[in-house]
Amino acid sequence: MITVTLRLPDLPSDSYYEWQGTSGDDAITGFSGQTNWLFGNDGEDFLSSGRGEERDLLFGGNGSDTLKGGLGGDRLDGGLGSDLMMGGREDDVYYVDDSGDVVVERAAWLPVLGGDVVFSSVDFDFSGLAIERLALTGSAIFGTGNRFSNLIVGGDADNILDGGHGIDTLRGGDGDDTYILRHAQDTATEPGISPNLKFLEATLHGHDTVLAHNSYRLMLGIEDIFLQEVVGKTGELVGGLTAFGNNLDNLVVGNSTDNNISGRTGNDTLTGGGGADDFIFADELGARHADVITDFTPGEDRIVISGARVDMDSGAPDADAFHLGAEATTANHRLLFDGTTLRYDADGTGASAALDIAYLENAPLLTADDFFIT
C-alpha cells in the first residue's frame, strides 16, 4: 500500500509530505500547494508533482519509471533503469545515470544561463532540449549543448565538451579534455581565475585541446589549439582566422585557409596548414621561447616579427638585412638562417649574441621577402 507521511523538520516552512510506493507499479501524484517527496521504490512507477509550485523531489527507485515535474523547480531522479523525466515551468534538476534515461524539457520561452541543470554520469546530449546547464560526473565523457547559452562542466574523465551554437561556458576538470568551440564568444573558466580570459583551466589538469571554429587565444592551462574548417554563408571556406597560444609549450595548428599563427611564449610547435599563413613572433625572443615551424612555404607564408622585439624598420626588410648562415658577416645582417635555425642579431658582426626565433623543418629556402616587421 502507498503510504504518505507529513514530515516536520525544525522549521515549519521546511515541512513536506513523504510518499512511499510499493514493490509493484505505482501511480503517485503529490498534493497541490504542498511540498512533496515522492519515492517509487520497486516496479515501474509514475510519479507526478501535480499542479503545485513547490520544489518537489521525485525519486523513481528500481525499474523504468516516469517522473513528471510540476510548476515549481523540482528535482527528478529516476534511479535504476531507463527512466523518463519530464520537467515543468521552473528550473528543474535532473539526475541521469543510465544511457536509456530520457529528459524532456521543452520550455516555450527563451532559456538563459542559470536555468535547468542535468547531472549525468553517462554521456549526455541536450542539443534538442531547453536545458541550460550540464555537469558530467563519474566516467561520462561527452557533453553536448544546444543553441542557447550553456554551462557545461566536465568531470575527472577525458571529456569532450561541445557547447553548440550559443555563447557557452565550458569548464574542464582533471583528465585530457577537448573543447569544441563554435561561437566567437565561447569561454572556458576555472574557479579563482578571471572569467574575462578565454579557455582557462587550472594547470596540472591534464593535456587539453581546443577545436576552434573562430579566432581564439589560449589562456592558462590549455595546451593545444586546432583551427577548424569553417564554411561561410556563400559556401566558401572562411579564412583569416587567428590562433594564439599561451605561456605553455603549445601545439598551434591552422586550417587549409590563410591563418595567423602564434605560440606566444614557451617552446611551441606551429603548423599553418594550407593557405598563405603568417607566423607571428611578438613576444620575447631567445631559446626559451623559440618555436618549431613545421610547414613553412617560401613565397607564400610569412614570418612576422614585432618591431618591439627587433631594431628594424617596419615593412619588408632590406635584402642585406637577411643572411643565409649561422653567423653575421656584415654589420647590416639582422636575420640569420642556417637552413634550420632562424636568429635575430641586433648588431650584425658586433659583440651581441644572436637570439633564436624559430626552428624550421624541411630546410626551406628563405629570402628577405619571407619576412615582415610590424
Image (cartoon, grey):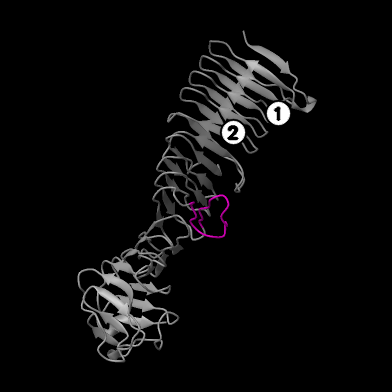
Quadrant holding the C terminus: bottom left
Residue placed most toward the observer, 359 or 18: 359
**Placement of 34 over or under 4, stated as above or below:** below
Q: Residue at x 25, y 77 (%)?
A: 298
The quarter of the displayed image where residue 99 is located:
top left
**Placement of 272 over or under 207, stated as above or below:** below
The residues colored magenta run: 186-202
Q: Residue at x 32, y 85 (%)?
A: 334
Visible in this render: residue 27? yes
Provide residue 341's location: percent of width, then percent of height. Answer: 26, 74
Provide residue 326's location: percent of width, then percent of height. Answer: 24, 80
Q: Residue at x 42, y 73 (%)?
A: 284
Residue placed most toward the observer, 50 or 6: 6
Q: Residue at x 63, y 31 (%)?
A: 74
The reply to whether the magenta stretch includes residue 210 is no
The quarter of the displayed image where residue 239 is located:
bottom left
Residue type at numbered disc 1? Gly
Residue at numbered disc 2: 87
Assign a secondary structure to mark 2: loop
Quadrant holding the N terminus: top right
Numbered mark located on residue 52 in the image: 1
In the figure, is residue 46 to the left or right of 35?
A: left
Assign a secondary structure to mark 1: loop
In the figure, is residue 74 to the left or right of 260?
A: right
Q: Earlier in the sequence, mark 2 or mark 1?
A: 1
Residue placed most toward the observer, 74 or 296: 296
In the figure, is residue 38 to the left or right of 369?
A: right
